[in-house]
Each structure stands twice: as C-alpha cells, then as structure tokens.
Image: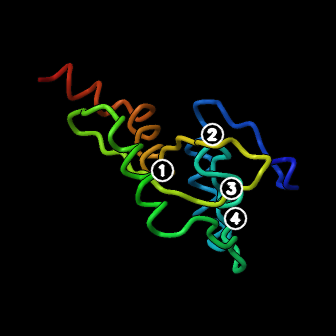
Amino acid sequence: ATNKGYDVLLMDGQLDVAMVSMLEQKFEKSRFTRVDSDVVDNLIVKEDRKSEVLEAGKQDAITIAFKSQLPKMDKVEFNVMTQALGENTAPVMITQSEYMRRMKEMDKYSGWNEFLWRNA
C-alpha cells in the first residue's frame, strides 16, 4: 500500500480497534481500512476501474476450478472473485471482509463471550 502512496499506520494494540471505531464516528466522512482487507487497488474506492481482461466464460471457468478445490467447512463461506490485478501483483489473493474482521476483533476484546462461557 505504501508503494501506491497510501499512508499506513501500524495499529496492532488492544485499544486500536476501539480507537479506529471512535475516529470513524468522529470523522464521518473518513474511512479506515485494513491494508490486508482487500487488494490494494480496492482499498480506496475510485471512479475509474480497471477493465476486465478475461471474458465471462473464462472467468466462470476459473471460479468453478477454484471452488472445486476449497474445503467444505461448517459455518464458513468462501467467495471466489476474478479481477484484473496487474502484472506486478500476486496471481491469487485470499482476504477476509473488513466487516467480519472487525466483528471478530470487537468480540475478542470485549470479553462478552468469555462472560457467557463462565456463567453457562
């Protein structure tokens, strides 16, 4: 992300999740996104999108090929997307949605699950 000119903050402490949430509420027009939550070109929403390189039939074939190799797991859903990422990018990227990651972090630091398990 720094190669694309984005400012990146290392926020890996316990209070950082709450801090980012507070900043997003205070600065409503600002948005904070984890660098590893998506491919670099999708971190900041832009009007000009890269054109798709593959035709729809080839995209479908790639999607089917990847989905056939994914493990079958309870309560887990994998979404396969094809995008033109550029020649200097990794050919395959695995990401977790920003929303799910934040929910898991909030749950981890809130202690609510631990309270429920102790009192069950």
Contact, mark 1 vs mark 2 (Cβ under 8 Å): no
Which residue occupies 24% across, 32% down? 73
Name the spot of residue 95 as percent of width and height, x first.
Answer: 53, 43
Camera-near label (4 vs 3) is: 3
The residues tagged by marks 1 and 2 sit, at their Cα atoms, a distance apart of 18 Å
Q: Which quadrant holds the C terminus? A: top left
Per the rendering, the mark at residue 16 is 2
Name the spot of residue 92 as percent of width and height, x first.
Answer: 59, 42
Per the rendering, the mark at residue 97 is 1
Q: How many marks?
A: 4
Name the spot of residue 28 as percent of width and height, x first.
Answer: 62, 71
Camera-near label (3 vs 1) is: 3
Which element is circle 2 on?
helix
Amino acid type, mark 3:
Leu
The residues tagged by marks 4 and 3 sit, at their Cα atoms, a distance apart of 15 Å
Q: Nearer the viewer, residue 49 or 27?
A: 49
Amino acid type, mark 1:
Ser
Residue picked out by circle 4: 44
